[in-house]
Amino acid sequence: MKYDVIVIGAGASGVMSAITAARQNKSVLLLEKENKIGKKIYATGNGKCNFTNDYMKKECFFGNEELINNMFDNFSKQDTINFFNELGILSYEKNGYYYPNSNQASSIVTALELELMRLGVDICLNSIISFVTLQKSDNKYIVTGKTLQFENSDSKNKKKKNDIIINEIPFKHESSNLIFSTGLLASPKLGSDGSIFKIIKNLNHTFTPIAPVLCGFYCKGNAFKKMAGVRIKSKISIIDKNNVKREDTGEIQITEYGISGIPVFQVSHCISELLLKKQNVIGQIDFLPDFPSDKLRDLLLANIKILPEKKEFKYILNGILPDKLWNEVFNNVNLDSSFTKKGIKKRELPFDEFINNMIDKLEKSIKHYSITIEKSRGYDFSQACLGGINSNEINTKTLESKIYKNLYFTGELLDVDGICGGYNLQWAWASGYIVGKNIK
């Protein structure tokens, strides 16, 4: 089959590029190796699809500055809101985050699917790409591969778990323009597994180092197993050469392997960047970010005064921190949490000196808890990636390849990633729109 445009990958950016190109009266084929379009979209915003953000600043993005600037110049968050409003999506804003009024990511996917149908875009699911070649005689891209059919699949060819492949239908399509929108390696179970990298490299493109972001991290030490399950509002700071490189505040989750939660995701690009450089990554957690050190000291002293003589000192943290943190806060600065006021007097230790020393150390442990971050949880548990196709090989205005004419890249494949809050989807919508508008 011959088309004006073939899009490989039916995620957010691929669908947007297909819609934008089709609106310019281009014939478009959308190829997807999964059994439905927009699989990653279903997982965004805890299934509610946080599709953009009111606070849209360049500081929320990482990667190539020219690409980021181009997004702000061409497709704003208001453009995104208007785009979905025109597709029938009523949206609402909460703390700057925009969601469909249905609170269902499926509403976004359905709206996109309906628009693809309205525009006459051909969609081919369960399609595996084998080769992409450029036919130099007429500058046409030839895409070959196979479409899988599964046992017990319904009329939409939606495969089910453990389905058996009963047929492989070969295909060969031709187009004047080719768009890669396959993502990198984040959440491979949802489609981005890197299987297309070899084909892209065969077209003489290279990749910068890639690493998972928006994920949790393994940390050094057994203390995390003892603290596992704790969720607490905290501030995490990433320290590099005695300077705070990145920090964020919110609910941090302490797990058996280390740390997770939105604040960790927000500093994950910085962590992964340092890990790529083989540097020791030191984090610092403030377990009481809204409570100044002087007030914390006064509170601890007050709690010591009302502590029964025979009760362990760890109980002065009751009501201040979750009980799973008590022992670790003491252990972190080599204090014995089992000490009692009576025990200190029995040992004939200088009471006031001991108490003041303990308060100093506890304040440090609570407000400046140091951790060593060893590695990420990996691509299976990440929502995005840093890195991508080398930006020197891309026209940052049109997102067209500098190596081959009419070859384009969108979304996560390019060297741009954002923090949590709809920023990666905003980049997907914007990059898809930019490519679709620039199709020749």
Image (spheres, rainbow, N blue to C red):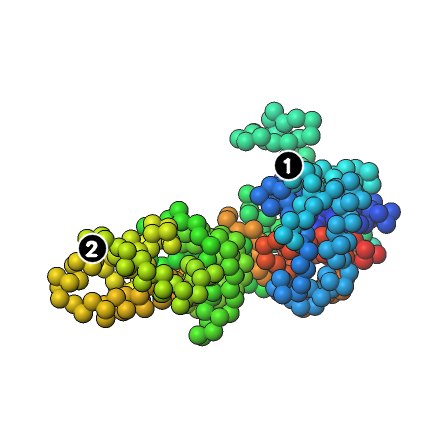
Q: Label 1 neighbourhood size at 10 Å, few (<14), some (14-19), many (20+)?
A: some
Where is residue 244? Give x, y as percent.
49, 70
Q: Please name whichever residue, 369 or 115, is drawn nearer the observer in this view of the structure.
A: 369
Res 35 label: 1
Q: Please name whichever residue, 8 or 233, is drawn nearer the observer in this view of the structure.
A: 233
Of the 4 image quadrants, the one containing the N terminus is top right
Q: Please name whichever residue, 357 or 95, is drawn nearer the observer in this view of the structure.
A: 357
Amino acid type, label 2: Glu
Relative to 376, 79 lies left or right: right
Name which residue lies at 61% across and 24% down: 152
Where is residue 312? Give x, y as percent.
23, 54
Name which residue lies at 47% across and 73% down: 243
Say what secondary structure mark 2 lies in: loop
Name which residue lies at 61% across and 64% down: 62
Res 309 label: 2
Relative to 12, 184 lies left or right: left
The quarter holding residue 119 reads top right
Where is residue 151? Give x, y as percent.
60, 26
Name which residue lies at 67% across and 59% down: 55
The quarter holding residue 126 reads top right
